[in-house]
Amino acid sequence: MARGQWLASMLLALACAAPLPAQELLDEVLVTGEQPGPAMWKAKRGDHTLWIVGTLRPLPSKMTWRSKQVEDVIARSEEILGRYEGRATIKGGTFAALRLLPSIMRLRFNADGRTLREVLPPDVYTRWSAAHRRIFGHDPDPKERARPFYAADLLFDEALKKANLSEKDVVWPKVDDLARRHKVRIRSLKIELPVDDPKAVIRDFAAISPEKETACLVATLDRIDRDLPNMRRRAQAWAVGDMATLRSLPVVNQQQTCMEALLERPKLRALADQARAKVEADRPAIISYMLAAHATSFTAEPIDELLKPDGLLAQLRAAGYAVEE
């Protein structure tokens, strides 16, 4: 993730073992070139079918996703159910948002000028320093003033690069391209989040407790140290359609801990609750419409969400749809 994008990604998300030796961290994901990705699911009612393909991140950075089966489904689909896209609207529009940009950028650093060494408990700082040395290849600057949130984001991003993994979305850009090629409409899903007092939201973010931010950094270090080999295995399994391996390697994600830090603040929690309520209210009705209106339709969902006991597939079954893999 590029510097400066970390806060935007966190706010957009409101709409939704022993350490590894260095040589293992640098092992390359072996799956490169074109791969078909996993099998799809079919949600059916009568002779109407919604096809669902599971998406995954991170994936091999050199992989190009292509599926003849998906292309065939999209070609005969009447409509595609698109992704949710969150957008915060600030009173005063673009110019008001631009005036807030310096304040937002300052949120990357400790407001009181303290260094990361001063902010973190000694054991966590020692662990972060060792990870920084292993991943970036040099000691951290002792005067580093990054907030734990930002330090965690930079470290995780670089760890993925070293492992030849990328969080770049490979599925939806291909779906968009195929939809244009076959002239299939994509039903876009938008969440508008009006922010009446953006300065209060910025103050809320600035006031997140150091203990919560430290927990986010520790969870990120845990994922790098313990889950990186499984990230590679999941990526390889997704690329070749190995669903048994994907089921045996559930995603361990530090984002839940980091989101809990954000949600301790009332303004940020209100935005999250607003976005969640919108999705929960709209999603069942939209899917019901897609299956009622179209003989064939298509969508894509994160595979970990699909496989959850209370995830989309379980919800569809509970609503009376026949679900086939």
Image (spheres, rainbow, N blue to C red):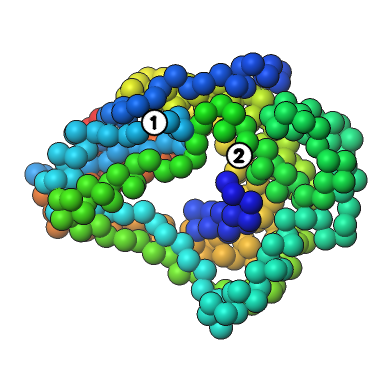
Are there few (<14), some (14-19), or many (20+) residues within 10 Å of tag 2?
Answer: some
Residue 199's disc number: none
Residue under label 1: 63
Residue at the spot 57% in from the left edge and 46% down from the top edge: 1
Residue 276 against residue 57 in the figure, above or below: below
Are there few (<14), some (14-19), or many (20+) residues within 10 Å of tag 1?
Answer: some
Residue at the spot 52% in from the left edge and 28% down from the top edge: 164
In the image: residue 30, left or right of residue 196: left
Residue at the spot 81% in from the left edge and 56% down from the top edge: 110
Q: Nearer the viewer, residue 71 or 39?
A: 71
SS at mark 1 in the image: strand
Please identify the quarter of the rendering in which residue 83 is found: bottom left
Residue under label 2: 157
Please identify the quarter of the rendering in which residue 160 is found: top right
SS at mark 2 in the image: helix
Kindly identify the amino acid type of the residue bearing the numbered disc 1. Met
